[in-house]
Amino acid sequence: MGAPEPKSKAGSPAARAVYWAAALGLAAVFLYYSLRGIHWARVWEVLRSARLPVVGLALIVISGSMFLRAVRWRVLLSAKGNIPIPLAFWATAAGYLGNNLLPARAGELVRTLMISRRSGLSKMFVLTTALSERVADAIALITISAVVLLALPVRPGWLADAARPFAAIGLCGAAAIALLPVFESFYFKVLAWLPVPHAIRSRVEHVVTHVIQGIRSFHDGGRLARFLALTAVIWFADAVTAVICAQSIGLSLSFPAALLLLAGMGLGSALPSTPGYVGIYQFVAVSILTPFGFGRSDAIAFSLLLQAAGYVVILAWGLVGIAKQRSTDKA
């Protein structure tokens, strides 16, 4: 029996309505805070001064970071099958495009289906590795923010205040990855005890088996070491991208401040958001960069450039990935 199709967390009409209400409300609040007192003439002046060769370098680094993310995901997928690097890259690109255009991070489903259809791997296994990768990124961002906040004399208030609850969430995620597979036999004993029809029990057991296999991808020492090494390189490259984008418009952004900015953007993206995280990125940029000497208008200009650079790369590679998937489906 095949695995059931993964469901979006905003699957039902009522859930979608609640999600969109929360996302639009947060976006409105964040934009109101971020755009107060902005001098749009200054924003345009800063953006117009962008040096295109330097922006082009940022686009190359972003593309490289996306490639490394695909390689990192492939490390987890290798627990059950040998996924070609091109397939992992195109699925990653299409998934990121889905996350930018669709609500509730539906791009995770896009890349899951692309890998599952081409490889024969269980949808639940692939989806679990994708979501576990996101949990690992959250843990990495929490660690980065904690280290940077301890080292910097300037501490943006909301991020310093949010560090503890986010750390608690991150620790819970790490504990889940470490401990859930240990109790696998217990889950099946509970399922056997429950008075449910055999067909339902079989489907649930199938899902649990593949979810546990996805989480267990982290339990191999060599695989975990490769994953962690790639994670460090990826976030280093993303911080370099932020520094390059700032330099392209004549702004000075230190590497620690860039790491803190990325941590804020990454953690903020966990909130209900409109496609493209409109409002959240502007709020994070203004609140984190102004204590480091950025004017509010400069922070907005920088956030727009950084977002635009990411959109260009994700749109370009994502559209190619989707086109390749369609051509494969027609073949």
Image (cartoon, rainbow, N blue to C red):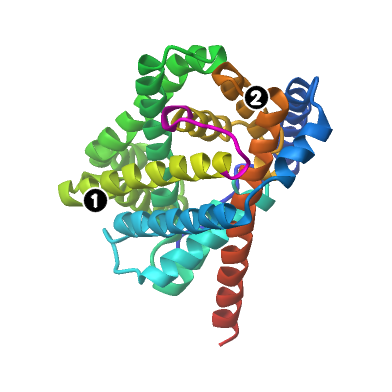
Would you name the residue on which mark 2 appears?
A: 286
On the image, the x and y values in percent for residue 202 come to 40, 54
Kindly report the distance in space between the C-alpha atoms of the residues bearing marks 2 and 1: 35 Å
Q: Residues within 10 Å of mark 1 (few under 14, many from 20)?
A: some
Location of residue 230 with respect to 272 vertically, above or below: below
Residue drawn at the location 55% of the way across and 52% of the way down: 54
Q: State the extent of the magenta-drawn residues as a range.
A: 248-257
Location of residue 5 with respect to 138 vertically, above or below: below
Numbered badge on residue 226 = 1
The amino acid at mark 2 is: Val
Residue situated furthest left in the rendering? 221
Residues under numbered marks 2 and 1 in contact, where contact means CB atoms less than 8 Å apart: no
Question: Is the stretch drawn in magenta largely helix, strand or loop?
Answer: loop
**156 to the left or right of 116:** right
Q: Quadrant of the C terminus?
A: bottom right
| Residue 168 sits in quarter | top left
